Image (cartoon, coloured by chain):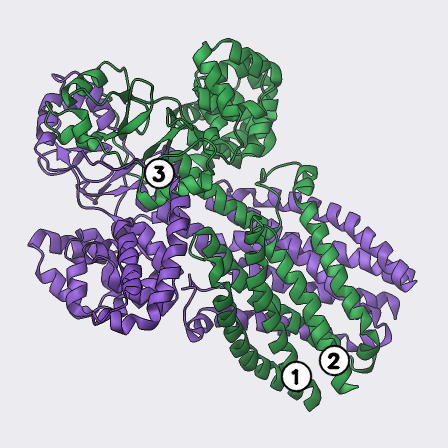
Chain colours: A green, B purple
Amino acid sequence: MVDKEPDFQPSEERNEWDMERIHELAGRLLPIYADVAAGRIDDPKIQRYLNELIGILHDLHPADMATVLESLPQQERVMVWKLSEPDEDGEVLLEVSDAVRETLIESMGQQELLAAIEDLDADELAELAPDLPKEVVHEALESLDAEERAQVVSALSYEEDEVGALMDFELVSIRADVTCEVVLRYLRRFESLPDHTDKIFVVDDDDVLQGVLPIRSLLVSDPEELVENVMSTDVVRFRPEDDVEEAAAAFERYDLVTAPVVDNNKKLIGRITVDEMLDVIREESEADMLNMAGLKEEEDLFAPIIDSFKNRWMWLVINLCTAFVASRVIGMFEGSIEKIVALAALMPIVAGIGGNSGNQTITMIVRSLAMGQLNLSQSGRLLRKELGVALLNGVIWGSVMGVVSYLLYGNIGIGLVMVAAMTLNLVLAATMGVLIPVVMEKFGRDPALGSSVLITAVTDSGGFMIFLGLATIFLL
Amino acid sequence: MVDKEPDFQPSEERNEWDMERIHELAGRLLPIYADVAAGRIDDPKIQRYLNELIGILHDLHPADMATVLESLPQQERVMVWKLSEPDEDGEVLLEVSDAVRETLIESMGQQELLAAIEDLDADELAELAPDLPKEVVHEALESLDAEERAQVVSALSYEEDEVGALMDFELVSIRADVTCEVVLRYLRRFESLPDHTDKIFVVDDDDVLQGVLPIRSLLVSDPEELVENVMSTDVVRFRPEDDVEEAAAAFERYDLVTAPVVDNNKKLIGRITVDEMLDVIREESEADMLNMAGLKEEEDLFAPIIDSFKNRWMWLVINLCTAFVASRVIGMFEGSIEKIVALAALMPIVAGIGGNSGNQTITMIVRSLAMGQLNLSQSGRLLRKELGVALLNGVIWGSVMGVVSYLLYGNIGIGLVMVAAMTLNLVLAATMGVLIPVVMEKFGRDPALGSSVLITAVTDSGGFMIFLGLATIFLL
């Protein structure tokens, strides 16, 4: 029996405590790290710090170790990485973000890398392979047996967003014509069962999937009962080329823990597990959030300035282009602004409320499309509803700002143009807020990507055009 | 054995096919629904449609039924709801979004509601209770035994974001001093085991948690072995008052399927399961996305216009206020704009790039804080890095726009003011992009909420102020 005082802290609290101490110790040790690495330490205080740090690192779960590494600046990160136990290095590499993984792999020699990855399963090796030096992957493949090598190669043949890339090859399968007692005896011969085993896959002689035997059913069944009488044949299963986000949605919908993956001949080739799906859901929503904010991908917090620049410049340039277009729209009306300078002060209000309201509409629709709640045949009805909301908002907030503008500038005309322009720009925002994602979806594009930039571009340029145009017609 | 042709379609595809047909059938039946409800149908074609619709609905999983209901306009939704089988009504009510749940419950009589919820577990009943009429909850509680009633009351006593509110009371517990063989025999006495049972909880005579016995270990252990020699004592456990988002992060981190919940005396009181955590992760990221777009909460796609208005007006008003402040900043410089009208056309570019870049910084930081990667003691270092990125962007894109402005207006002064203003506004955006979330976190506020609005407000007003201020000083 492992004799450890059970830990009654929620893991997050425990974590934060360790984290600060690790940061403190790493900060103290970094300046003398060259001496530490060479084993030249005389100062007993430094030795104590070092021992304490190594002790903390030793007890960390690989996932916690990954968080620690992600939170450290690059020099401290490499030092802590070198001080940590190498036997779980592979697990940690799997857990850290892509950006941090690169910095860790760069700091390792070929032999260290090989040692780190030698205990990984085929699917895990395949996950790391794209980030590893070619020679290391080659040598690692050499050390595998033919079956495992075939699994790695197969996993590498799928795109990152296909089920095949996340597939796990470790599974337990049985025949349908044996009794539950036989299954229990068979399981007892295993050293350990694969992670997350909540069901056993039932296959025929050609490995064609017949059904699944949930462990929950196995445990309550009469031992004499045949598997085929206990198994369930209505199984949610996937093909390796299925989209991982759809698989994750199915896991969520049907409360799955594991599910079989079958090929075109219905042969069982692997399984996927809920822990991978949690990551998919997290990454999916993060990708949306990052894209909406104009970041290409997740960033290492302490990345060199140039790396952050590369991750962000593209959206900035797109934004600059749309802002330039809006600026030229204003340029067209410089004559009007020269005559009524108040227009310059009021125009951002018209553009701003359009952008805000358009983003509300578009976000709601992107979300409904992602959840499978919105049928494209409904878009007409939806558009009518959004137009209603836009008109209501336009009349109310347009009037408020109309009155305010009138009070500020003492010109009833400016007030009326303000009401009309705000209402029209809200109508434009509602129309484009429905059309942009619906059209993107129709053409098979991801409606989340760039929708927000597009709608803001339209409501900015459109808002300036509507407001300055109306003012030019009615006030000059 | 259930004799069904195994389904080899990924669930999503299957779903979409049904969905369109359901929409079509519902559309055809709606106009004559009064007759249908009264049983007055003579037309055999209508009868066929009705039978087909009922057939499709009958085969739907409650989660799929929920998606169908969410995708239908309100009248069709109520009709389909009335046509669906009542025996899984409770499950469907649990699955639909809050907004749609309200419309469904409104359409049901008291007896129907009682019938729908009578098979629910204590934790499920507690989840629905806030949306149900008081009399229904009261009557449902009456029908429970004392233990279940206590469970419902306990679950209702926790906030929505506390582990206690998601806790499940159905679990299997055993003593440490029995053999695995005894455990297996004990399990066989169950009709069925609770969902997601991947471990059995080991408790002493006072129900104090001693450890857990993973089913995976139980299955491979020698039947004669004692539970205490097989169980694991290093258990991730939660208290009912823990935050659900932290619990979900722990599930993700440690790849859990279920985890025990204990009270202050370490007594086992319930468990939480991974399916609830999937929902938490999905809702957490959705809430961030909705908030960033200025929506108060998830919306029923086909909500009446007035409901959508209520959900959206608050952020529009906040946006209107910040836009008004920006407008007054411009108003301060009307004299300058009157003299150099080009300023009016160029100023949105300065404000725009600041907002975009500030949102990039803030999103990255909000995300790192949420993932526990960012230690507040690191904020100084992070600020220096972000300032570096801002300066680099400012010099590059500022120069590009400076040259463009010079070419457009033939005025070298305008070009230089443009470079300086863009660089300064990017520096302002970087500073506030780091400070806003860090300060919010320090004061225990959610840094995601409203950060985006705040940074845009600062970079808009700040951008106008910097650009028009510099222009007034150097160009007039």
Report x, y in % for residue B269.
18, 44
Question: Can you identify the residue that label 3 sits on?
Answer: B251
Report x, y in % for residue A339.
82, 82
Q: Is there a contact, CB below 8 Å, between mark 1 and mark 2? A: yes
Q: Is there a contact, CB below 8 Å, between mark 3 and mark 2? A: no
Judge from the rendering whether residue B412 lies leftward or rightward of residue B379; answer left or right.
right
Amino acid type shown at disc 3 = Phe
Which chain is indicated by disc 1?
A
| Image quadrant where one finds the C terminus of chain B | bottom right
Q: Secondary structure at mark 3?
A: helix
Evaluate whether residue A442 shows in this view. yes
Dots 1 and 2 on the same chain: yes
Mark-to-mark CA distance, 1 and 2: 9 Å
Residue A342 is tagged as 2
Q: Secondary structure at mark 2?
A: helix
Amino acid type shown at disc 1 = Ser
Residue A405 is tagged as 1
